[in-house]
Image (spheres, rainbow, N blue to C red):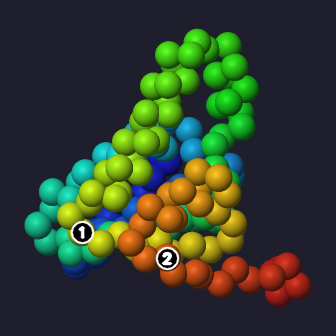
Amino acid sequence: MPILYRVDGAVARITLNRPEKRNALNEELIGALKDSFALAAEDEQVRVVLLAASGIDFCSGADLGALDRAAEQGVLDHLATARELADVFLAMRHHPKPIVAAVRGRAFAGGCGLATACDIILPRNRPNSATRK
C-alpha cells in the first residue's frame, strides 16, 4: 500500500508508505494520494488533514525507476502523468480543510512540492546518524 489512510477523531492521517524508495512518487502513490485527499474532503468528522511519511525521509520526488520505464513512452503519456500530479497539488490547494505536512528528513523536488502545497509545514526531527543504532 503506497498510502496509509486513517481517521483519528477529527484528524485524517495520510502517510506516504514507500520507505524503501524514500517515498518516491510513482503513478500508484499519486493516485492513492488523490483518492485520500478526496476521502478526507468528503468526511464530515474530519477537521484537519495530516500528511506524513514512513521511513527516514518525507519524499524524494519522482521515482527514478519509473522515469526509466517512462523513457519509452510518448509525449501524451508524459503529459497525463504530469497532469495527475498537478491534479493532486490542485486538490490540496483547494481542499476544504487545512492540510498540515509533518516533514521529517528530506523533501526533494515533487516531495518539496507536496510539502509546500500544504497549509502548514511542521518539521519533525530526524535522529542523526550518531544516535541511530
Q: Quadrant of residue 7?
A: bottom left
Question: Measuring 69% from the left and 66% from the top, which residue is drawn there?
Answer: 106
Residue at the spot 39% in from the left edge and 47% down from the top edge: 88
Image height of 83 relative to 95, above or below: above
At which x and y percent is residue 56? 68, 68
Q: Which residue is mark 1?
A: 97
Where disc 1 sits, the SS reads loop
Quadrant including the C terminus: bottom right
Q: Residue at x 65, y 84 (%)?
A: 125
Q: Amino acid at mark 2?
A: Ile
* Label number found at residue 26: none
Q: Which mark is residue 121?
A: 2
The numbered mark, 1 or 2, whose residue comes first in the sequence reads 1
- Distance of label 1 from label 2 (alpha carbons): 15 Å
The amino acid pointed to by label 1 is Lys
The residue lying furthest to the left in this view is 44
Q: Is residue 39 shown left or right of residue 81?
A: left
Q: Quadrant of residue 46?
A: bottom left
